[in-house]
Image: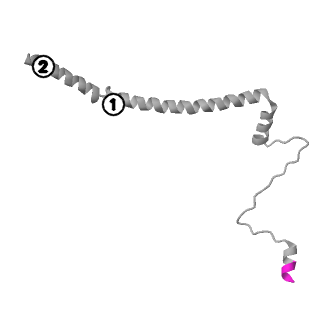
Amino acid sequence: MKLLAAILLIVLLGLQYRLWISDSGASEIWRLNKEVAAQRTENRGLGERNAQLAAEVRDLKQGLSAVEERARSELGMIRSNETFYQVVPRDPAAPAPVHPAATTAAAQ
């Protein structure tokens, strides 16, 4: 009877070792669960990106307004009856322009 109890105890300890300590035990399952959660998060983000791209493709196939917007923003195109004005920001290091009226008023 003592021999049977000792054998069962050794088997129990071996199984516990495999479950808690070995590479294919509970720690591996926890690591895999973390990887699955990270992959699901990445998949969600990629799914949203795919939906945006599908909507853009649908827009480009159906309407000319999306094509026109893309031509204007990416290629800088304008219509034949439009005038293009480009506003260049002032260089902060350059001195401010002096108006002639301001200089004559200061001289008097």
Q: Which residue is mark 1?
A: 27
Residue 38 rendering spot, x and y as whole percentages? 47, 33
Whether residue 107 is in magenta: the answer is yes
Q: Is residue 4 left or right of residue 72?
A: left
Q: Which region is colored magenta?
A: 104-108
Q: Quadrant of the C terminus?
A: bottom right
Whether residue 93 is in magenta: the answer is no
Q: Main secondary structure of the magenta part?
A: helix
Q: Tell me, yes or no, whether the two marked residues, 1 and 2, touch with CB atoms within 8 Å.
A: no
Residue 94 rendering spot, x and y as whole percentages? 73, 66
Badge number at residue 5 = 2
Residue at the limit of the structure toward the bottom, as seen here: 108
Q: Amino acid at mark 2?
A: Ala
Residue 67 rendering spot, x and y as whole percentages? 78, 34
Q: Amino acid at mark 1?
A: Ser
Instruction: Name the mark nearer the viewer: 1 or 2.
Output: 2
Tell me where residue 90 sits by quadrant.
bottom right
Residue 39 rendering spot, x and y as whole percentages? 49, 30
Residue at 54%, 30% (x, y): give it. 43
Q: CA distance from mark 1 to mark 2?
A: 29 Å
Badge 2: residue crowd in 10 Å (few <14, some 14–19, many ≥20): few
Tell me where residue 21 sits by quadrant.
top left
Residue at the limit of the structure toward the left, as seen here: 2
Residue at the limit of the structure toward the right, as seen here: 81
Would you place residue 30 above or below residue 72 in this image?
above
Q: Say which of 3 and 66 sits in front.
A: 3
Mark 1 vs 2, N-terminal side: 2
Q: Is residue 18 left or right of residue 85?
A: left
Residue at 84%, 75% (x, y): give it. 102
Would you place residue 89 above or below residue 34 in this image?
below
